[in-house]
Amino acid sequence: MAQVVLGPLDESVGYALKQAAAVLRSSMDGVLRPLDLTVPQYACLELLKQHPSLTNAELARGVFVSRQSMNGVLQGLEERGLVVRPDRAERGRALPARLTDLGRERLDVASSAVRQVEEQMVAALGSIEKQQLLAALTSCRRALEPHGTEPGAPR
């Protein structure tokens, strides 16, 4: 059986994408640390702002963590007064979290900091190049995900 070789890493789209993701994550960690937030905590707050009725499972998918890890993320945010969750479910078992006023304030500052990181990342690209990059990355994601699913997007 012939061995398949990836080829030079500097010609691998997947490797370049992983490198970019690692540097992006590190940069986001750097701007969120002074705000006492992790990247998953920030992502959770952002999702709750944009989609207020998400369940724990939907948040976990959107933040790219397990359900168990999402529970820990929410507990940490709740202990610091950034989100609140009801004691009892209105129906079913879901206990949807909500941003508090303090959570919204912290999110506003965090969103601005993360946006600056993203702007720095794409600063060398023109408007059309940014649109093309977004379209290309979306196509790559869709090519690899099971039909009908969209990891990271609330359902």
Image (spheres, grey):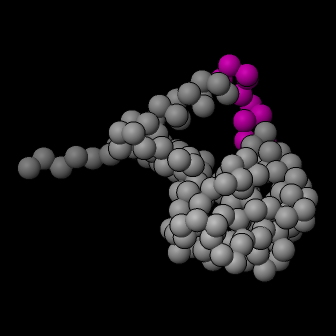
Q: Horizontal placement of 154 versus 3: left or right?
A: right
At 39% across and 39% down in the image, what residue appears?
A: 148
Residue 148 visible from this viewpoint: yes
| Rendered location of residue 63, percent (x, y) | 60, 58
Q: Is residue 30 left or right of residue 148?
A: right
| Position in image of residue 65 (x %, y %) | 54, 65
Among the 4 quarters of the image, the one containing residue 109 = bottom right
State the image coordinates of residue 155 (x, y, percent, origin top left): 53, 47
Write down the quadrant of residue 101 in the picture.
bottom right
Identified at 60% across, 74% down, the residue is 71
Comparing 112 with 78, the one in front is: 78
Number of marks drawn: 0
The correct choice, above or below, for 128 with respect to 122 in the image is: above
Classify residue 81 by image quadrant.
bottom right
Of all residues, the one furthest to the top in this rendering is 128
Q: Position of residue 112 (x, y in %)?
A: 86, 49
In the rendered image, residue 35 lying in the magenta stretch gets the answer no
Residue farthest toward the front in the current orientation of the protein: 91
**Residue nearest the observer in this picture, 140 or 60:** 60
Q: Is residue 141 left or right of residue 125?
A: left
Q: Which residues are magenta?
A: 120-129
Image height of 17 relative to 77, above or below: above
Residue depicted at 66% across the width and 64% down the height: 96
Determine whether 63 is above or below 117 in the image: below
The residue under the point 67% across, 27% down is: 130
In this orientation, does residue 77 appear?
A: no
